[in-house]
Image (spheres, rainbow, N blue to C red):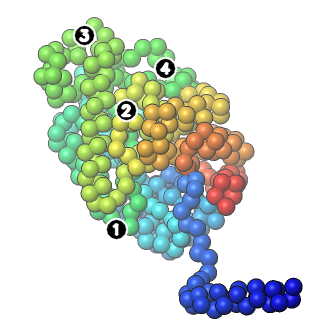
Amino acid sequence: MKTTYLFAVLVCFFCYSVLPVSAKNKKKTPVTEQKIALGVWDDVDKTASVDSIIRWMKPFDEAGIKNYYMCGSPEEVARYIEAAKSYPGAKVHAWMFTVNAPRDSVALAHPEWFDVNRVGYNSHEYDPYVKHYKWLSPSVPEARRYMKDKAASYAALEGLTSVHLDFIRYNDAVLGRRLQQYKFKIQQDTYRAEYDFGYHPAAIEKFKKQFGYSPLDLQAPWMSPEWLQFRLNEVSSLVNEIAGETHAKGKLLSAAVFPYPTRARMTVYQDWPTWKLDIVCPMNYQSFYSESLDWIPFSVENGLRETFHKNKYVSGLFVPDITAEELYQAAKLSIEAGADGVNFFNARALLKDGKLEAARRINQEFNL
């Protein structure tokens, strides 16, 4: 028995002694790729230095948040990319306003680029709902080229993870129930002409060439499957053209979209399951629709039913309207329904009322 034991010890010693030095001394490296991706949306601090951004990122990194979807100019986003190098696994995404261009001086200098509603009002002068809704027309070639060039300016950033498209849609033809009732105090029991966009002369002419008539010739154009599909295609083709140019630069393409495909198609003419995205971030803001937290997995499941995980599904949650415990539950429900990650809107709200703890709990439960 002693002889057998001694032989085993010698074999083990010999096996260890012939290992390369690098294998003997190899230390475990920290895992930086999350199983469940956690992220935040927020505006850049235009005056922040790289050092101050590093300090700003610290509490989020400690809570397990690795993805930063930052809205700002390419130069401003570049500082966040530099700061993220201080945190292993941190990724920066350039969040850009796409079809909506409220503060874009170049776009605003071209009124002819802006979309038109069914009444005939141009979005450059007419504000549907709020003053920061200024919608370009995806049917105007010059506006389309401008949006693609804008995305390309972000895709050129070294170290950027993705170009993140937001407002990549038409104006809300129909708002969520809560927004109708409490914020804007309107009743949308049909597609009201002042909110129904896509009627730019360039779009109508393009539609007429294809079908031989104008949507305005119809008694109820909002009921026309052809006119609906035409508008869906105008946005989808724009996204997929941006995808080709973005991927050619070695960057991913992501987008913030409306909650699930049927709602997105019906209310903002957005057909995101057909888009060539690497990451899709449906904004599952249940409070906007006067729904409970149980609505969130319904939205996630219906999104995944059409995308089949061809891209990463990251569930967007609206932080201000719920408690820390509800935020944790919303994130957990998203993941259990199949989401690959969770994004919190926004970072500032996450730092209030102990809500960052919800992200920490999710990270500990699903990533550690």
Mark 2 or mark 1, which is nearer the start of the sequence? 1
Question: Going 66% across and 54% down the picture, which residue do you hit?
Answer: 366
10 Å crowding of disc 4: few (<14), some (14-19), many (20+): few
The amino acid sitting under disc 3 is Leu
Q: Position of residue 302 (x, y in %)?
A: 52, 31
Looking at the image, residue 121 sits to the left or right of residue 313; the answer is left
Q: Mark 3 packing: few (<14 Cα in 10 Å), some, or many (20+)?
A: few
User: What residue occupies the far top of the structure in this picture?
Assistant: 219
Residue 49 against residue 210 in the figure, above or below: below
Q: Which mark is residue 218?
A: 3
Label 4 vs label 1, nearer the camera: 1
Q: Position of residue 227 (x, y in %)?
A: 27, 20
| Residue type marked 2 | Asp
Quadrant of the image occupied by residue 38: bottom right
Q: Position of residue 368 (x, y in %)?
A: 67, 61
Q: Are marks 4 and 1 in contact (CB under 8 Å)?
A: no
Does residue 53 appear in the picture of this structure? no
**Element assignment for label 1:** loop
Q: Nearer the viewer, mark 3 or mark 1?
A: 1
Residue at 61% across / 81% down in the picture?
Answer: 27
- Mark before the other along the chain sequence, 3 or 4: 4
Q: Is label 3 in contact with label 4 (beta carbons under 8 Å)?
A: no
Measured Cα–Cα span from mark 3 to mark 4: 26 Å
